[in-house]
Structures are given as structure tokens and as C-alpha cells.
DNA sequence: TTAACTTTGCAATAGTGTTGCACTAACTTA
DNA sequence: TAAGTTAGTGCAACACTATTGCAAAGTTAA
């Protein structure tokens, strides 16, 4: 993904595209999976944890990435689709491989509709499937 | 729930019912919702964190409780049904209230069946719905 | 160019989860 | 029942993730 594409994307979500943010976004987008703060930190060595952390928070607030809580012990982040507002309508299943620890967005599998009991409202959901992915099988 | 009932339950799952374990189980069962290590710690003040932690781990290994990762930052635990083996067939949706932070087991809502792409196997799943519960609405 | 604001790096801290070790309680078996 | 073995508990320490305050550096706008 080109840098200026990324910059446009960030701007379209009202986030100023700094060098760090562009880098973080690019890494996430190109990895094709959900990455944790620690994962990202490893990938660029010389960048401060807190800087990445704040970039992710900014992204999250502006629906540029969505958090994935997969039970690995750390929250991971994956890039949203263009029209995503991170509510229940545009969320999908995530697959967590218990062998390699990788978390993959299954955009082809939307979260099924659930009829909640009276009185409950929802705005968000997480559906994580744990198992073994093809490359580990 | 009576103590001797709990003791029988733990024994039936091959866990020796010590005083601490009985207490932890009782607290979980009576709360009617999922509690974190910190929640439990607060409820009895004078019991060691590590003791509760190990009780929970033992319970988890023996399918007496199941962990719930609700995105609150700490793992919570809820008592299993009698015949639960914590695999995908006997799991249910959990509801996380973003106002009060309570996590409720929705035993009446089983996790829907999902057809994974070729090559993926699954043994477990987490389905958390975030929203507002009736008492907070 | 200065002033105002934003972002980054550094350092410190809080919270959760986890382990080693020593002590004690409980269980086993001669 | 006494001695030996095993299991459980409490304490302290520690690792790791997440988070924040503050000061320096960079950016933007008048």
C-alpha cells in the first residue's frame, strides 16, 4: 500500500497522517492480520511503545482500526474496512490459532444476528473462534 | 447453594474440595455472573490472590468454570453447567454491559454455528456482546 | 518569526497474571 | 498411630501489558 494512499485514508477519517501513524497503519494493513502493541513494537525496534499506543488509540477512536480481544493476553488491532463504524453491523468473526498465536480477520464471516432478551441493547460484539489454522495443521 | 452440594460437585469433577475452593466456587455461583480475580479478591479481603488464582486455574482445567474474555482488561470466570466441557457445543453468548462492567452468561443463547473456510478446525469460541443491560438503561 | 498546538520520546506507574519457595494441612501406609 | 509423602496455602517477587505526566521536538497559523 502506497504511503499517499494511507495518508488520504487517515485524513478522510480526520486523523493527521504523521510519519509514525502512517508507518503503524501500513504495518497493520500489510500484515493482513491483527497485531498487538508488542507485535508492532518488535517490528520497528526504535519506536516508542507509547507512541504506537497512542497512534492505535487515535485510530480506534476514529474507526480506522478495531481492537480484537482474542484471549492471548494482549489486545490486538486490525484495520477496518472503509465503511466500518465498528458497530455490530460491520463486524466479523476473528479466528485465533492456538498453535501459532496468529489472529486473522474473517471478513467473509459476518457476526450472526442474535436476538437478545428484552431490555438489552447492543452496540458492539466480539466473536472469536479458537482452533488451528491451515498452516499449523 | 449448600456447602456439601458444592463439595459433591467439585469431587465429581475430581477436584478436592478445600475450604478455599468451596468458598471461591460458592461466590462465583451465587454472584450469577462472571467475576475476575480482582473481583473475587475484593469479596473476601483476607485471602491471597495467588490462592484464588490457583483455585480458578484448577477449576478451569477441570471444566468447573469457564473463562470469559470480555475486553474489560481482566479475564473473568463463570461457573459451567453440569455437563459442560467448554467446547464449542456447550458455549453460550456473554453480555458485557459497558455501563456497569458486569458480565452475564446468556445460557439461553448458544453460540451459533459458523461454517469456517476449508482447513480451519475449531475447538472453542468466545462470543461477547457489548451493550447496555436492563438495569443500566 | 513568534505563539499556539500537536506529536513524540522518556520515564514512571498501575494493574493483571504468574511463579518459587517455605510452611502447613491432609493423606497414606507400614 | 507415627513417619513419610503429597497437596494446598500464603508470601514475596516478578513479568508483562496498558497507561500517564512531562518535557522536548515538530508543525501550523497568524
Image (spheres, coloured by chain):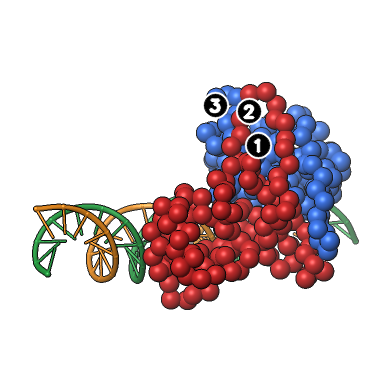
Chain colours: A blue, B red, C orange, D green
**Which quadrant would residue A112 be assigned to in this image?**
top right
Check disc 3 and report the residue beneath it.
Answer: A136
Give left or right: position of A66 versus A85: left
Are both tags, 2 and 1, on one chain? no
Identify the residue at image location x=86%, y=41%.
Answer: A83
Residue farthest to the bottom? B45
Residue topped by disc 1: A95
Estimate the x, y position of residue A98 in percent, counting from the top left: 54, 37
Sequence-wise first label, 3 or 1: 1
Residue A20 position, x and y percent, is 68, 43
Calculate the distance from the C-alpha at mark 3 to the C-alpha at mark 1. 13 Å
SS label for mark 3: helix
Q: Which residue is mark 2?
A: B120
Q: Is residue A37 left or right of residue D12?
A: right
| CB contact under 8 Å: marks 3 and 2 | no
CB under 8 Å between callouts 2 and 1? yes
x 76%, y 34%: residue = A109
Labels in figure, total: 3
Amino acid at each position: 500500500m502506497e504511503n499517499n494512499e494511507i495518508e488520504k485514508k487517515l485524513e478522510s477519517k480526520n486523523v493527521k497522517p504523521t510519519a509514525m501513524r502512517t508507518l503503524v497503519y501500513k504495518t497493520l494493513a500489510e500484515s493482513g492480520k491483527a497485531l498487538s502493541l508488542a507485535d508492532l513494537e518488535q517490528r520497528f525496534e526504535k519506536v516508542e511503545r507509547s507512541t504506537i499506543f497512542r497512534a492505535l488509540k487515535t485510530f480506534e477512536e476514529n474507526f480506522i482500526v478495531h481492537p480484537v480481544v482474542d484471549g492471548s493476553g494482549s489486545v490486538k488491532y486490525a484495520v477496518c474496512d472503509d465503511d466500518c463504524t465498528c458497530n455490530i453491523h460491520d463486524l466479523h468473526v476473528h479466528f485465533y490459532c492456538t498453535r501459532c498465536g496468529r489472529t486473522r480477520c474473517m471478513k467473509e464471516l459476518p457476526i450472526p444476528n442474535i436476538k437478545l432478551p428484552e431490555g438489552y441493547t447492543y452496540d458492539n460484539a466480539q466473536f472469536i473462534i479458537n482452533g488451528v489454522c491451515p498452516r499449523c495443521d
